[in-house]
Amino acid sequence: MHEGDEITTIEGLGQPGNLHPMQAAFVACDGYQCGYCTSGQIMSAVALLNEPCGPSNAEVKELMSGNICRCGAYSNIVAAIQSVRQEKLSESSSVVRPNRTKADK
Ligand code: FES
C-alpha cells in the first residue's frame, strides 16, 4: 500500500545537538514526563504543521486527539506545538532576519 514511500521516524528528525525545532520545543516546554508517548506526539506535531489548523489551542488539541499521554502532559505539549507554529509564522512573515542561523532555531 505504501511501497516506495519515504518513512521518517523520530530518530530521523534530529540528532542530539541538532534537534528538530519541535523536539527542541518539547524540551523547552517540558512537553513530556515519562517519555512513553513522546515520539508519537512529536511525529504527529510535526505532521500537524503541514495540516490546515486554526490558531487556537482547542484546534491543536483536536488534531492531536489521537495521541494519548498517560502522564497528562497535554498542556505543555500544546504549548510546545504552539511555540513552533508561532516561530514558523513569524519566519514566513518576515523578509529579512539578520543574526539568525539554523542553529538558533
Ligand atoms: S509523557 Fe508519559 S505518557 Fe506522555
Image (cartoon, rainbow, N blue to C red):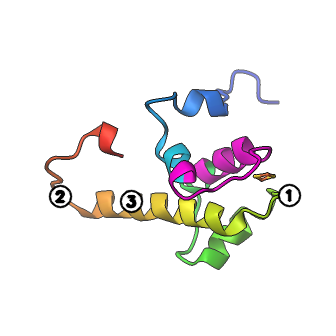
Q: Residue furthest top?
A: 4
List x then y, in percent, for residue 85.
47, 61
- Look at the numbered disc 1 and say if its residue's Cβ is closer than 8 Å to ligand 1: yes
Amino acid type, label 1? Arg
Crowding at dot 2, Cα within 10 Å, few <14 / some 14-19 / many 20+, comes out as few
Q: Quadrant of residue 5?
A: top right
**Element under disc 3:** helix
List x then y, in percent, for residue 74.
71, 65
Q: Going 57% across and 78% down the picture, which residue do you hit?
A: 56
Crowding at dot 3, Cα within 10 Å, few <14 / some 14-19 / many 20+, comes out as some
Which one is closest to the eye, mark 3 or mark 1? 1
Lateral position of residue 29 relative to residue 39, left or right: left
Going from N to C along the chain, the mark reached first, 2 or 3, is 3
Measure how far apart labels 2 and 3 are at the Cα level: 14 Å
Relative to 43, say whether 16 is above or below: above
Q: Which mark is residue 87?
A: 3
Q: Which residue is mark 1?
A: 70
Going from N to C along the chain, the mark reached first, 3 or 1, is 1
Foreground residue, 50 or 28? 28
What is the span of residues highlighted in magenta in the rendered image? 26-46
Residue 81, magenta (yes or no): no
List x then y, in percent, for residue 23.
55, 44
Measure how far apart labels 3 and 1 are at the Cα level: 28 Å
Q: Which residue is mark 2?
A: 95
Amino acid type, label 2? Val
Crowding at dot 1, Cα within 10 Å, few <14 / some 14-19 / many 20+, comes out as few
Amino acid type, label 3? Glu
Relative to 85, say whether 41 is above or below: above
Q: Going 59% across and 58% down the picture, which residue do you hit?
A: 51
Q: Are marks 3 and 1 in contact (CB under 8 Å)?
A: no
Q: Going 67% across and 31% down the picture, which residue do you hit?
A: 9
Relative to 28, say whether 58 is above or below: below
